[in-house]
Amino acid sequence: MLVPSVALVVLAAGVAIPLAVADSPAAAPCHQVPASVRALAGDPSAAAEALDPGDDLRHLGSARKLLAHETVCGDGAGVLGRVAEAATRSSGGRGEPHGMAQARSAYAVAALRDIELPEGLAPGVARMVAEYVVDAGRDDGPGIDDVTGPALPASQARLGKDGWVRLGRFLAPGEAHAAFEYADRTRDADADIPDLVAELAKDPEAFAILYDAERAYLAHYLERLTDQGGDPHHRPDRPRDKRFRTSATDWPDIDLRHLADRVGTLMKLRTRYAKDGTIPDLAAFDRAVREHSRGTYRPADRRLGTRPPMGDIADRRTAGPVRGDLMDGRQQLFVVFDAWAKERGVPDRRAGAMRQLLDDSYVRALWLRF
């Protein structure tokens, strides 16, 4: 997880402070990002090679050395953020799935622990989280004991005989997945996404990136459900053990609850930081978030059977500018959901139940453990 530093907190609050100069007697000189590292920002393959910790995380220390500097000269922190982005996105560009090297690199970025990150890096790390929106939203559920490394091959994302896969629904074929739930105490490696999000949410641009990704994912997810709000891949064959019997709506309901929980958590963090002074001017913070937000999202008016890679989910086209109060997370969820339910003719009873579970999960996340 990230450990907040004075520099990061000040950045998150939207206040600029000068970096310590190299000859200042009161501070250590800033780190000058070398040209060789700057070049990685424009070379995804080379960036992934530089940050890839390997299956056994043997090279995790190299990733830490590349990214972890308490102060960085000039625009260096932003450059490092772009390196993190380049290393973790598909080297083939839009429409291409992540490979194992990219997924392991994403784990390396998320697994930075007990390190004070330089100010300016938060947006780049947030874009990495958005790039892996499905993996980052996966909780430590059934099958966690089977995860043996920082990334999982595409073969583990295939549907089982019962139409279920632990890694999530509607996954792109051939895509590797970052196993953020994996931990290796011998390497001091633990990619705690909730803690990471809590730190990133202090920065308005990073907040906007994470919020946009969740709303885009909601539109993406809904447009792949049936007109009854169910999983089209659910298989009616019932296992003998009643504990494992599911309906076509069980997993969609669980996924939607988790998604609403994540949006509610973002809003809870915003309120907490306004109360404790981390965000000294909430109105200014909100304006900055809105400026960085890409817009609003609308599901397709018919069920889609395509399965784009994760990087394309958060990068999907917007349906227009944000309308209403962007920081009313519940209402913004409803904007996406209501459009889908109306266009698809979802039965009133089912639509009402789905809307209620979004509402309940959002409110619970907003207020519990505050």
Image (cartoon, grey):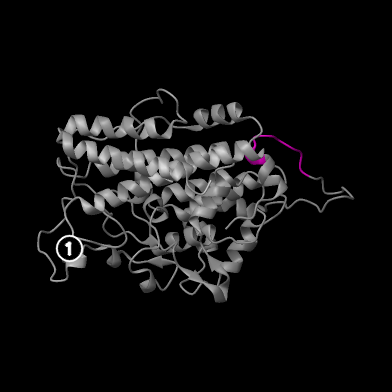
Looking at the image, the residue that sits furthest to the top is 324
Q: Is residue 117 left or right of residue 170?
A: right
Q: Position of residue 45 (x, y in %)?
A: 47, 57
> With 45 as the anchor, is 345 left or right in this view?
left
Using the rendered image of the protein, determine whether residue 41 is visible from the camera's viewpoint: no
Q: Answer with the quarter of the image where residue 237 lies.
A: bottom left
Q: Residue at x 49, y 75 (%)?
A: 56
Q: Main secondary structure of the magenta part?
A: loop
Q: Quadrant of the N terminus?
A: bottom right
Residue under the point 52% across and 40% down: 207
Q: Position of residue 137 (x, y in %)?
A: 40, 53
Can the viewer see residue 3 in this picture?
yes
Q: How packed is label 1: few (under 14 Cα within 10 Å), some, or many (20 or more)?
A: few
Q: Amino acid at mark 1?
A: Arg
Q: Does 262 appear above or below 240?
A: above
In terms of depth relative to the viewer, which is nearer, 265 or 80? Answer: 265
Q: Position of residue 249 (x, y in %)?
A: 20, 50
Q: Mark 1 sits on what residue?
A: 245
Q: Is residue 357 magenta?
A: no
Residue numbers of the magenta segment: 11-19
Q: Residue at x 48, y 42 (%)?
A: 367
Q: In this orientation, which residue lies closer to the viewer: 61 or 229?
A: 229
